[in-house]
Image (cartoon, rainbow, N blue to C red):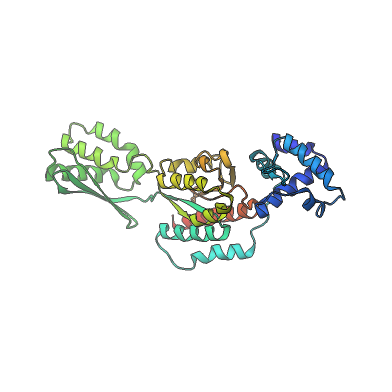
Amino acid sequence: MTGATKLIEDMNDRTREVFRRVVQGYLDSGDPVGSRTLTQSMHEKVSAATIRNVMQDLEHLGLLDSPHISAGRVPTQLGLRMFVDGLLEVGQLNSSDQEKIDATLTSNERDVGTMLDRIGSALSGLTQGASLVLTPKHEAPIKHIEFVSLAPDRALVVLVQADGHVENRVFTPPPGQTPSSMREAANFLNMLAEGKTLSELQSTIRTEIHAHRRELDGLARDLVENGMALWDGDGESYERLIVRGRANLVEAEGEEGNLQRIRNLFDDLERKRDIAEFLDLTEGGDGVRIFIGSENKLFSLSGSSLVVSPYMNSDRKIIGAVGVIGPTRLNYGRIVPIVDYTAQLIGNLLSGRD
């Protein structure tokens, strides 16, 4: 039992109901909830003064806050966390939401990136937040690797995979490269690469270079190391972070004067320096996780909430993540099943392609 759950269980029925109704009212409207409003919806007939006393107690506990004098209350970040952990009722995915997500898959789209882009757009439209989809790195057995000289200080490394996927990247080769050293480097890699994925090849490449040091020309050895390093740098574990629905965040926060927070969030998303950290947020296995405000280490400056879930391949290996980010007053009860279903759908689709 978490501390939040125990604190909620220790509340009497009236206090628990006041707390739940204040939080739910705030999540529904974004506005502070006043005592007079609650007198109309409480199960127990109580006066506005009694409810105000309960609200003050909850404020002293750090669960509610009063943004203005004589105004209603809103939940604090701690209050939202307690609500999510102890009182949140997560419903089933409704058929309308499911149909809209499924409708993104009507075309026989072969490109995974385009398909995930379309799913991300549908997700942001459904939730009125910004959707985040971390796409998996393309992994297939290597068919052929080739080095192509473009200029004395520029070369191209071409990677052809067995499923027809082609990647090519320009890099600066070590000085003194010759057509012969390029052929030798490509032959060496193709000998090792047959039937291996890129990650499998990278894990053995340095060992093999050391073992064949005497046989492999120094120029070719340097070319192999430089060329393969292009697929071994920071941020290459995953292809890209697809972000859709940023305008939703501006609309959600514009009236509250929190646009600077949204600008901070946009800056975080533009830099994408910690793209792999997005997946770290899902550590602990499959299932949806909720990060509220400063709990969200990746986008903490924006004070936003993030609902995120990993998705897996047919081997139950986490290969990406999908989430929704927005103001702390997200409709968590509705968004959690949407994110959960979307993550499972993506995992099943990609597993079918394996």
- The reply, left or right, for residue 300 in relation to residue 196 is right
- The reply, left or right, for residue 219 in relation to residue 229 is left
Query: Nearest the camera: 72 or 243?
Result: 72
- Residue 4 in the image: state x and y as whole percent: 70, 37
Instruction: Check the image and name the residue furthest to the bottom.
Output: 107
Query: Nearest the camera: 13 or 35?
Result: 35
Quadrant where the C terminus sits is bottom left
Please tell me whether residue 310 is drawn above or below residue 99 in the rendered image.
above
Instruction: Check the image and name the residue furthest to the right.
Output: 45
- The reply, left or right, for residue 310 in relation to residue 232 is right
Q: How many labels does the image show?
A: 0
Query: Nearest the camera: 5 or 21?
Result: 21
Residue in the picture at 86% in, 50% down? 44
Quadrant where the N terminus sits is top right
- Residue 275 in the image: state x and y as whole percent: 43, 43
Residue in the picture at 57% in, 60% down? 126
- The reply, left or right, for residue 203 in relation to residue 215 is right
Residue in the picture at 62% in, 65% down? 96
- Residue 241 in the image: state x and y as whole percent: 43, 50
Residue 349 visible: yes
- Residue 336 in the image: state x and y as whole percent: 61, 52
Residue 318 visible: no
